[in-house]
């Protein structure tokens, strides 16, 4: 029974990441094989999760088939709220 509950929780969290990525991120192709990717920093997602979202966006847009490199990363404050500071990560990169 515990195994079934654990599998259900993991499956529901996997579904959340897809929804959150679509809602809380933006991929923008730029000229010369460059790109900009912005993702809201939502708990419990880490920077590694946001990189995963970036890679999914690259695949969905058929961008950087030979790989990519991140050239700059910035954290920006979007708002101060009662629950704390709302921030986004912006990744700049280019295709290899």
Image (cartoon, rainbow, N blue to C red):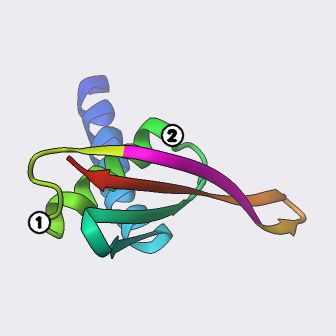
Q: Position of residue 68 (x, y in %)?
A: 25, 46
Q: Secondary structure at mark 2?
A: helix
Front residue of 22 and 32: 32
> Which residue in the rendered view is the most extreme toward the front?
32
Q: Which mark is residue 47?
A: 2
Q: CA distance from mark 2 to mark 1?
A: 22 Å
Magenta residues: mostly which secondary structure?
A: strand
Q: Secondary structure at mark 1?
A: loop
Could you tell whether 91 is left or right of 69 in the image? Answer: right
Q: Is residue 73 magenta?
A: yes
Could you tell whether 47 is left or right of 12 in the image? Answer: right
Could you tell whether 62 is left or right of 75 in the image? Answer: left
Q: Position of residue 63 (x, y in %)?
A: 17, 63
* Residue stretch rendered in magenta on the structure: 70-77
Give the residue displayed 31% in from the left and 75% down from the top.
31
Give the residue displayed 42% in from the left and 42% down from the top.
49
Q: Is residue 12 visible?
A: no
Q: Position of residue 90 (x, y in %)?
A: 55, 58
Q: Earlier in the sequence, mark 2 or mark 1?
A: 2
Which residue is identified by label 1?
62
Q: Is residue 42 magenta?
A: no
């Amino acid at each position: 029974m515990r195994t079934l509950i654990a599998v259900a929780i993991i499956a529901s969290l996997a579904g959340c990441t897809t929804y959150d990525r679509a809602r809380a991120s933006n991929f923008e192709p730029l000229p010369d094989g460059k790109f900009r990717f912005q993702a809201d920093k939502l708990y419990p997602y880490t920077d590694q999760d946001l990189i995963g979202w970036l890679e999914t966006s690259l695949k969905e847009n058929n961008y950087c088939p030979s790989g990519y490199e991140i050239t700059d990363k910035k954290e920006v404050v979007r708002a101060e709220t009662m629950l704390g500071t709302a921030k986004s990560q912006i990744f700049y990169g280019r295709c290899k």
